[in-house]
Image (cartoon, rainbow, N blue to C red):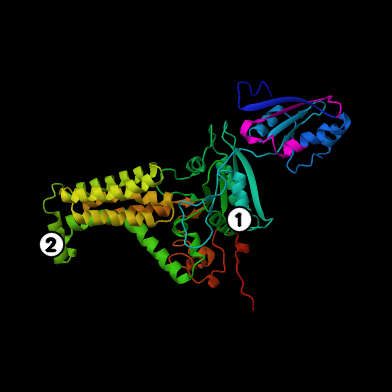
Amino acid sequence: MEELFHTCDDIKKKRMNLGKNRDVACYLTFIEVSVDMGNSALLEVLKYLRGLEREEILRVLEQNALGTSDATYFTTIEEAGDGLLTGEAVFFVDGFAKAVKIPDDGYPNMGVNEADSEKVVRGSNEGFGDSVKQNAALIRKRIRSPQVKVKEKKMGVRSNTNVYLVYMEGIAYPELVAKIEERLEGFEIDGVLDSGVIEQLSEEKWYSPFPQFQTTERPDRAAMSILDGRVVVLSDNSPIALILPTDYNSFIKTSDDYYNRWEIASFERLLRYFASFFAMTLPGLYLAVTNFHTQILPTTLLLSFADARSGVPFPAVIEVIIMELSFELLREAGVRLPGAMGNTIGIVGGLIIGQAAVEANLVSPIVVIVISFTALCSFAVPNEEFATAFRLLKFFFIGICAWLGFFGFLAGLLAVLIHLSHLKSFGVPYLMPYVAADLNDYEDERDFLWRQPLRLLWKRPIYAKKNNRRKLRMKQ
């Protein structure tokens, strides 16, 4: 162990003699901040062994009678080194042929956080933390069933990151779990420091702007997905869980869609669908109409547009691109600056730049309105990673609509739809249930554009095993 961890000053190595006669040589090693020597299970173990004879100490170790529930035995130095790097203490006793891992505080972490990116009006505010064990416990807290299975994998040749696959036995397809494991084992990398690394290296269509793994930092959303027959991938040191397989419709849903009444949930979901459409197309549609097809506008509105643009020196497409890039810069600056300063730069910077640009006749007021409405639409998409696809495609539509007008707009929509129709997430069509709805007897259509009353959602979606899709029965 001294040779394996030489020049590691943060790892404490203690030699000691235990037993009644102090005749049992022992060696204890641990990472400095991961063990509390003042008040811990480890301290109690050492006190206990200090009062035993040599033969009693060896018998206690042989019978795993240390009184700790998570004591693990290692037969090789390499295993002991890996156990030490999990943040626990490793204990050697002269005359005993195994090393013992004794649990303690472990690595420091932020604990249970509040979910930041998926705010809800109704429901739990708990969010995942940085510890994969803690995150798995938050899911078990919500699904207290032995059918919830957790498979542990090590990823990263040098980081040895713990990755958990969490699923419901009997509901999730075993073939799906096996396929996910195969995909995770399909690459080797030095280190996995966040679940985003797993996502990018495991995606089938890696070039697509649309994510094929759904992300969440909400334990209730992860638990809901597990009950639907999906698999959740948790990575150590990451508060973001991966849910798969997924589809377009799953990114539009939120947790509180199922906690609120069906009327308001359906209305809000329709708003999000419209928001996702306009976040991608509105600036391009504005250019197509004002540059090529002005005849579809009422005369008074057209004159208003022309009056607003009088004195602007740039073509409309340059005007739109300037404002879009300015807004993207403000968004990036707001994210990178800390706390209240980020909020201030976003609001004040947007107001000042927009007002100054209009007064200087660099852009027209109507373009500021269009760009602001587009930004609101992108913020209304619940999943941030999903929303970035529309932010990128927005510039594609600006270019093609400035070139071909409304025909370019239709061609762009057709290209996006063809691309979406080719996407799959572990065998599930990305446009489910708009396509292949008959595979589940059209039951998935009860929960897509609008959400039917909860008492009618009695079947699990397509992800669950076919013979176990019933999830609700009303008692007489």
Residue in the foreground of this view, choosing between 131 and 378: 131
In the displayed structure image, the side of residue 390 where residue 358 appears, left or right: left
Residue in the foreground of this view, choosing between 315 and 57: 57
- Front position among marks 2 and 1: 2
Name the outermost residue toward the left.
Answer: 311
**Which badge, 2 or 1, comes first in the chain's sequence?**
1
Residue drawn at point x = 38 percent, y = 42 percent: 337
Residue 286: where, in percent of width, then height?
23, 56
The amino acid type found where label 1 is placed reads: Ala
Q: Is residue 403 visible?
A: no
Residue drawn at point x = 82 percent, y = 32 percent: 50
Residue 105: where, in percent of width, then height?
65, 40
Taking the magenta stretch, the answer to whether it contains residue 30 is: yes
Residue 303 tag number = 2
Which quadrant of the rendered structure holds the N terminus?
top right
Residue 474: where, in percent of width, then height?
61, 74
The amino acid type found where label 2 is placed reads: Leu
Magenta region: 20-44
Per the image, the residue denoted by label 1 is 172
Residues marked 2 and 1 touching at CB (< 8 Å) = no
